[in-house]
Image (spheres, rainbow, N blue to C red):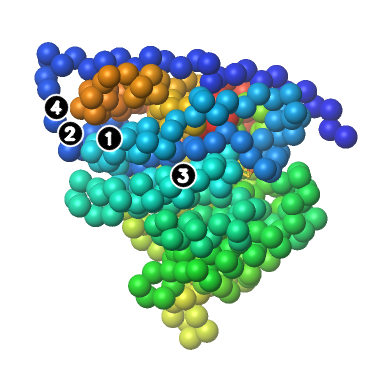
């Protein structure tokens, strides 16, 4: 039995009030792309719809902390669907084009399809459909795939860390069998979720967190299985998110090592990034005739530890209770909930968000990379342990 005791500081209570915009100094209409201090636009919004989860992945919600004594947010503290949609609309008016629903486990949020139906009607400043997606552990996907598709969801990311049931169960730590998740992915494909106009499932992505010593031997079996289905498999470096997962640099398998391993078996071709701020470095595969073929699937690498992508980071995160976080590694959020519950108009809220974004300087992964290079103490761990950060299950991955 693991009797590791991890002190948990509740960062949820430390919300920063949002300064109201100086309306006298200048009225700014909605419909404007805002840029932060590093000239990064506000393109992506990740919304956590619940802080609860039916898994206890040790890298995210370790059992020792998220146990029967842990206090989750009460139902009344959660943003309502109307509040989420209103805030989403405001973000879209500031240039946001992509919204990802996450958690915790988003499929645990009751009637989530109603929120999806509302969000899927939003249009970007250019008049395009908003790029709406959802990240799930897949446990409830078989049951909900048809409903999600019917409510307007076009893309989905499913997290799968191993195909070997023993490894998968040890990583989710609740004995959940991998076959149920695979059935969920198949159900999503069967209802046409993620199916594009060329008949490819480009809208279904599989996320695998690689933890050295735990599941690296699953990399090739995972690639064989999901690429044969023509899906996109993304390898995520194990990150020092939150303050509870006991992160150590020695357990990070660099993407370069994953790529080298994949190349022993697959003919991978680097792909151009589709847009600025893309998190993954992408590779396509060649078919048996040696030609790059999108039907052969795609692999991606999210290398937040070894290749910081802060320079182009256009992501904001909205916590389950309505705090705005400007970085995954931030320790404090800005209180949008109080604002949305006040009499403040959409214009005033938009100006407040714009003001916060304009002041943004966050670039934690870049600083961590410098820390890694400094050679001071255990590589990267000095920064990782020096700051108290909010948990990923609370602000969403
Ligand atoms: N419960 C859903 C799921 O697991 O897909 C959504 C929330 S989860 C926080 C979002 C993503 O973050 C998942 O793909 C998960 O594997 C990833 N994640 C969680 N903790 C992580 C860590 N320490 N390092 C890297 N990725 C992590
Ligand atoms: Fe739950 Fe997702 Fe975190 Fe795993 S990674 S504990 S499934 S929120
Ligand atoms: Fe963005 Fe913060 Fe991650 Fe850098 S560390 S990529 S700023 S979320």
Q: Residue at x 47, y 69 (%)?
A: 192
Mark 4, secondary structure of its residue: loop
Alpha-carbon distance for marks 1 and 2? 8 Å
Residue 346 x, y percent position in the rendering: 24, 29
- The tag on residue 30 is 2
Where in the figure is residue 17, as x and y percent of width and height?
38, 14
Nearer-N-terminus badge (3/2): 2
Mark 3 packing: few (<14 Cα in 10 Å), some, or many (20+)? many
Q: CA distance from mark 2 to mark 4?
A: 7 Å
Q: Is residue 138 above or below residue 10?
A: below
Residue carrying label 4: 28
| Lower sequence index among marks 3 and 1 | 1
Q: Nearer the viewer, residue 160 or 101?
A: 101
**Side (left or right) of 21 relative to 395:** left
Pointer 1 local density, CA inside 10 Å: few below 14, some 14–19, many at least 20: many
Q: Please give the residue where the numbered disc 1 appears in the rendered image.
A: 90
Left or right, residue 79 beside residue 35: right
């Amino acid at each position: 039995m693991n009797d590791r005791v991890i002190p948990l500081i509740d960062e949820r209570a430390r919300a920063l009030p949002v300064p109201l915009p100086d309306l006298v100094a200048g009225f700014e209409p909605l419909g404007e792309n805002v840029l932060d201090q590093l000239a990064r636009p506000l393109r992506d919004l990740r919304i956590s719809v619940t802080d609860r989860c039916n898994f206890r992945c040790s890298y995210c919600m370790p059992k020792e902390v998220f146990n029967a004594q842990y206090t989750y947010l009460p139902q009344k503290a959660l943003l309502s669907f109307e509040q989420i949609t209103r805030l989403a609309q405001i973000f879209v008016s500031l240039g946001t084009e992509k919204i990802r629903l996450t958690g915790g486990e988003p499929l645990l949020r009751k009637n989530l399809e109603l929120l999806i139906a509302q969000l899927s009607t939003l249009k970007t400043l250019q008049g395009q459909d908003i790029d709406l997606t959802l990240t799930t552990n897949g446990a409830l996907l078989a049951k909900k795939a048809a409903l999600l598709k019917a409510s307007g969801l076009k893309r989905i990311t499913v997290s799968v860390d191993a195909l070997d049931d023993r490894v998968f169960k040890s990583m989710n730590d609740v004995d959940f069998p991998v076959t149920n998740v695979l059935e969920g992915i198949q159900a999503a494909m069967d209802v046409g979720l993620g199916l594009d106009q060329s008949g490819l499932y480009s809208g279904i992505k599989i996320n695998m967190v690689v933890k050295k010593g735990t599941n690296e031997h699953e990399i090739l079996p995972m690639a064989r299985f999901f690429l044969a289905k023509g899906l996109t498999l993304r390898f995520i470096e194990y990150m020092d998110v939150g303050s509870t997962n006991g992160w150590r640099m020695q357990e990070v398998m660099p993407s370069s090592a994953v790529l080298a391993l994949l190349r022993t078996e697959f003919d991978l071709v680097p792909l151009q990034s589709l847009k600025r701020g893309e998190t993954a470095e992408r590779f396509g595969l060649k078919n048996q005739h040696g030609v790059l073929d999108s039907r052969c699937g795609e692999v991606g690498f999210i290398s937040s530890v070894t290749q910081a992508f802060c320079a182009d980071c256009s992501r904001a995160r909205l916590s389950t209770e309505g705090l705005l976080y400007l970085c995954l590694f931030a320790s404090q959020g800005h209180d949008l909930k109080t604002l949305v519950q006040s009499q403040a108009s959409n214009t005033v809220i938009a100006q407040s968000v714009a003001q916060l974004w304009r002041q943004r300087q966050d670039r934690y992964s870049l600083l961590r990379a410098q820390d890694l290079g400094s050679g001071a103490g255990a590589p990267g761990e000095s920064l990782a342990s020096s700051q108290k950060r909010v948990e990923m299950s609370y602000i969403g991955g």
